[in-house]
Amino acid sequence: MKIVIYMIILVFFISCQAGDPDAHSAKQNEHKHDSAHENKGSKSKDYTFPNGTYCATVEYHHPNTASSNCYTLDVAIEHDKLVKIHWPDGERLDESHFTAEDISSGTCSFTSDKGYEYSITIIGKSCSFTESYRSGDHSDPPSRDHHTIDGVTD
């Protein structure tokens, strides 16, 4: 009789270690589902403005002198944040002068490290400036280069 009891206990332990095949299969499916969900979550975010250069109106205001100007310039966007403004003469205003701003709505405003106020509005892909204008010949500026705001011209 003892042998029968030992055999039953042995069979019981063996069956417990093998586990329920349906439960094992369910755990595998659950793991696959979790992995698929994690992969979807790790996909890159869809940005309103993919990384690149865009044409924008840049309104500038100097609060100490009350001078204001509006320019059409190329700006750099990374992950829906404005990170750089390119001036046609090769100069640029970048994150060393302002904190990258969210521009996913198409507009943003910020104050530079010198206290100048900027309002940026994206108007399209990269601006098209003539090579002569980029090299410093401003005798034939681009038609949308800049214009006067409040009677002050650059």
Image (cartoon, rainbow, N blue to C red):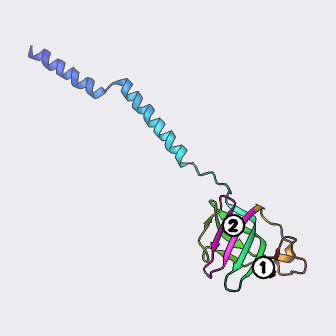
Q: Is 89 left or right of 13, judged from the image as shown?
A: right
**Residue 28 on image: x %, y %:** 42, 32
Q: Is mark 1 on a helix, strand or loop?
A: loop
Q: Report the label total.
A: 2
65 or 154, nearer to the observer: 65
- Earlier sequence position, callout 1 versus callout 2: 2
**Dividing the picture into quarters, in which one does residue 151 lie?**
bottom right
Q: Could you say which is closer to the camera, residue 105 or residue 7? A: 105
> Alpha-carbon neighbours of circle 1 within 10 Å: few (<14), some, or many (≥20)?
few
- Considering every residue shown, the one lying at the far bottom of the view is 65
Rendered-image quadrant of the C terminus: bottom right
Q: Going by the image, does 98 lie left or right of 31? A: right
- Start and end of the magenta stretch? 104-122
Secondary-structure class at tag 2: strand
Q: Nearer the viewer, residue 91 or 7?
A: 91
Q: Residue visible at 67% across and 64% down? A: 77
Which of the 4 quarters of the picture holds residue 68? bottom right
Side (left or right) of 142 relative to 22 = right
Check residue 141 for magenta coloring.
Answer: no
Furthest-left residue in view? 2
Q: Compared to 128, does 66 lie above or below?
A: below
- Separation (CA) of disc 1 from disc 2: 16 Å
What number is the disc on residue 136? none
The residue singled out by tag 2 in the image is: 76
Say above or below: 73 vs 4. below
Say what amino acid the circle numbered 2 marks: Ala
Residue 105 inside the magenta-drawn segment? yes
Which quadrant is home to the N terminus?
A: top left
**Label placed on residue 89:** 1
- Point out the residue furthest to the top here: 1
Name the residue located 43 percent from the left edge and 34 percent from the top edge.
30
